[in-house]
Amino acid sequence: MNSRRRQKQIERIGVLTAGGDCPGLNAVIRAVVKSAIAVHGWDVIGIKDGFEGLITDNPRSTIPLTLHSVHGILARGGTILGAASRTNPFLYTKRLKGDRILIDVTPRVMERIDELGLNAIVVIGGDGTMRIARELHDMGAPLVGVPKTIDNDVDGTEYSFGFDTAVNIATEAIDRLRTTAESHHRVMIVEVMGRKAGWIALHAGVGGGADVVLIPEQPFDVTVVRERLERCFEDVQHSAIIVVAEGARPKDGQEIYRAGIAGQETPRLGGIGFYLAERLMAEQESLPEDAGYEIRATVLGHVQRGGTPSGADRVLATRFGAAAVRLIAEGRTGRMVALRGEYLTDLPLSRVARMPRTVPLDSDIVQTARELGISLG
């Protein structure tokens, strides 16, 4: 069966955004809708709140997407479809007599796909979403994946949209914090996102001229960090910038988790910036009063996720969305679009999301950071 005949069989496709939000999601939605309608004449259905829209019977869980409905959304942050970062159809949380239980609702998902008359669905998400998409495709769901993450840690693609914007935001924050660090002769610690991969910390650290960059791939020695800071205060700058990914950890300890919030069951990484500040302050206690330095920590948090996507992220997201539609037109579901060098490609979902894409310690950017005098702890 050739691709032209497959294309005639397609009448309606869906699109959903799962996982956390990130800049560029609306650009993908727009590209999917415009290319599906203008090139192929298909109907497009927006599925609300990630996989939740394929589970609930609420009629508002889906919306028709038209050229009019995606007009003007290219530059908007977030997602017009909503996102649900904790919805897993294989482990769906349901309340039963006051208790929370986990159930498999994938049969309902398969039913909903048939009820909605969807010939294929574009699933936009990170590594966890791609794992779910792979398993649903194995059950027969016609899915195509589009990788998104500010962490840039989806396996199989060199870059994912959202990353460039997050790096720009973190770099600007470093620039702003440097002026106050220099004015008050302080150490400024900037905690950025990056649970298992240190791409944001490393790129922002190099781009912002940091003195120390701490990433999950390289456990750090607090003493080594302190020694680097001492050299910073011995030269003309009399200040220092440390960029630390939320998943970074000391060699003599474990990952740092922030204090829990009532009703929040899953512990979340965070707080490494304040932890590091306390450790460094403790190492100064034996020094003369005039020999130490002040330390301040700033956590960027979800600021990195929000706002207008950069031009690079808009272009990449648009390319991904159009490529996903081309895969559907060719009858090639069960695949994820990806960027390799300057070119788009695709690979089977079965080869995606086995492990997060982490920073190779022998990569050129790590080598560059070290050659510039940036300590990795």
Image (cartoon, helix red, strand yellow):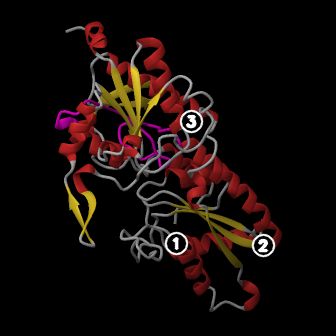
**Structural crowding at the residue carrying mark 1, measured as other residues with C-alpha within 10 Å and reported as few (<14), some (14–19) or many (≥20):** some
Q: Amino acid at mark 2?
A: His
Counting residues from the start of the chain, the first of labels 1 and 2 encountered is 2
Q: Amino acid at mark 3?
A: Asp
Q: Secondary structure at mark 3?
A: helix
Which residue is denoted by mark 1 in the rendering? 271
Q: Is residue 48 visible?
A: yes
Which residue is denoted by mark 3 in the rendering? 313
Marks 1/2: CA–CA distance: 23 Å
What kind of secondary structure does the magenta stretch mostly adopt?
loop
Q: Secondary structure at mark 2?
A: loop
Q: Give x and y (percent) for residue 376.
A: 52, 61
Q: Nearer the viewer, mark 1 or mark 2?
A: 1
Q: Nearer the viewer, mark 2 or mark 3?
A: 3
Magenta segment boundaries in residue numbering: 137-162
Above or below, comparing residue 102 to residue 89 in the picture:
below
Residue drawn at the location 40% of the way across and 53% of the way down: 85
Q: Is residue 349 left or right of residue 19?
A: left
Q: Give x and y (percent) for residue 88.
A: 29, 52
Which residue is denoted by mark 2 in the rendering? 185
Q: Is residue 9 left or right of residue 122?
A: left
The answer to which image quadrant residue 142 occupies is top left
View extreme (right): residue: 183
